[in-house]
Image (cartoon, rainbow, N blue to C red):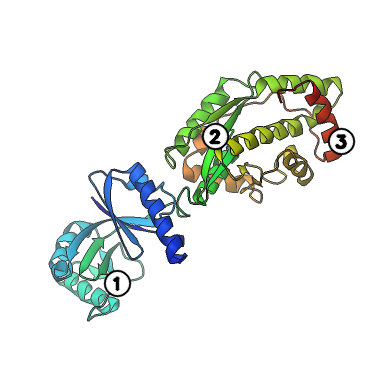
Amino acid sequence: MLYIVRYSEIFLKSEFVRKKWENELIKNIKKRISCRIRRNRGRIFIETDEDASEKLKKIFGISSFSPCHHCKLDELNDFIVEFCKKSLENARTFAVRVKRVGVHDFTSQQKSAELGELILKKFPNLRVDLKNPDKTIYVEIRENECYVFDEIVKGPGGIPLGVEGKVVSLFSGGIDSPVAAWLMMKRGCTVIPVYFDIRPFTDEKSIERVKLVAGVMREYDPDFELIIVDHGDFLSKLNSFLSSRRLEGYKCIFCKRRMLKVAESIALEKDAKGIVTGDSLGQVASQTLENLMVIDNACSIPVYRPLIGFDKIEIEEIARRIGTYEYSKIQVECKAVPKKPKTKADLDFVLKIEEEFYKDLPDE
C-alpha cells in the first residue's frame, strides 16, 4: 500500500529544524510500521505491505494522511477513469480537487475541470457538486508524478514525539492524568509514566486500571512503560503521624508533595526536564491555587499542568477521543482521602510539620 502523509507545524519551521523534525517523524513511523519511506516538499510517502491506517492515526506530527495510488502525468486520464469505477460506484455526485507542485502548462483549476469533464463523459449518470459531493477525487501532481486518492484521514497533529525531550508523568490511570500525558506527547515530549501504588488504601482494581490505560497509551508510543512506586507504606506512616496531631486535612498535600519529590528524583535520573500532572484548577481540594503553590514547592524542576484550565467535560471528551476513557472510568477508591481536606494550606506551616515527619523517615 502507498500512503501520502501530511504535516502542518513542521512545515512552518526553519530548514534546519524542519529536517530534524522530519527525521524524527520518519523514525517514529518506522518504529511502528515496516515500510519504505521517501519525502518530497512537505510530504512523506510510505510504501508498506500492511494496512497502516490505524497506526498512522496515532503518530504525533501527522496532521492527515491518505491511502493513494500512483501514476505518471501522461497516464493520469486513463488511470483516473479506472480509479473512479470503484471509487464512484455508489455516488451520485462528485468533485475533483487538484493540487500541483512544479512547473506545468496548466493550472490546478484547469486540470480539475478537465478531469471532471472526463469523468462525466465516462460516467454520464453522475453530476458535479463542488459544495457537498458524495465523493471527492483528489489528485496531487508533483512534477511528473501523480497521486490519486478519495480519502483524507485525520492524524493526531502536533509535533513528532521526542523532539522536545522527556517529562515524568504522575500517572494514576484515572481520567485526567492520561489526557495530560497525551497532550504533552502531542507537543513532542517523551513521557515517563510513574504510578504510585497506594495499596492497602485501595484495591487491585487500581493497578489493573492503570495497566490497561498504559496499554492504550502504548498505541501512541510503543516505549510507554510504567514505573511503579510503592507509596502505601509511606501513606500508612503519614496517616498515623497526621492523625496523632489532628492534621488529617493536610494528608493530600503531603501525599502529593512526596509524589513530586519522587518524580523529581526519577526525572533527574532519566534526564527529564519536568513533571506533568493532570491537575485542573479547583477540581479537587489539592488543586486550589494556594495548595498547588504549596505542593510545587516540594521540587525544584518545572511542573506542567496542561489541563489547568479545562473542565471535567472537556477532559472526558479528549479521553474518549484518544481511547483511554473506557478504562479510566473504572471506579477506584482511595481510602486515605480525609473527610475535610485542607483547601488553603500555609507553606511555612506545611514545611514545619513536614520537617517533623521526615525526622522519623531518614530514607525519605
- Mark 1 is on which residue type? Val
Is residue 199 toward the left or the right of residue 248 in the image? left
Is residue 325 toward the left or the right of residue 125 in the image? right
N-term mark: 1 or 3: 1
Mark yes or no: residue 56 visible: no
- Mark 3 is on which residue type? Phe
Q: Which residue is mark 3?
A: 349
Q: CA distance from mark 2 to mark 3?
A: 35 Å
Mark yes or no: residue 104 visible: yes
62 up-or-down from 102: above or below:
above
168 up-or-down from 44: above or below:
above
Q: CA distance from mark 1 to mark 3?
A: 66 Å
For disc 3, the neighbor class at 10 Å (few under 14, some 14 to 19, many from 20) is few
322 up-or-down from 259: above or below:
below
Q: At 44% from the left edge and 37% from the top edge, which residue is drawn?
A: 223
Say if mark 1 contacts mark 3, CB within 8 Å: no
Q: Nearer the viewer, residue 349 or 246?
A: 349
Say if mark 1 contacts mark 2, CB within 8 Å: no
Residue 244 at x, y percent in the picture: 85, 19
Q: Which residue is mark 2?
A: 328
Q: Which residue is mark 1?
A: 101
**Callout 1 secondary element:** strand
Q: Nearer the viewer, residue 83 or 250?
A: 250
Q: Nearer the viewer, mark 2 or mark 3?
A: 3
- Mark 2 is on which residue type? Ser
Q: CA distance from mark 1 to mark 2?
A: 46 Å
**Callout 2 secondary element:** helix
Q: At 57% from the left edge and 33% from the top edge, which residue is drawn?
A: 194
For disc 2, the neighbor class at 10 Å (few under 14, some 14 to 19, many from 20) is many
N-term mark: 1 or 2: 1
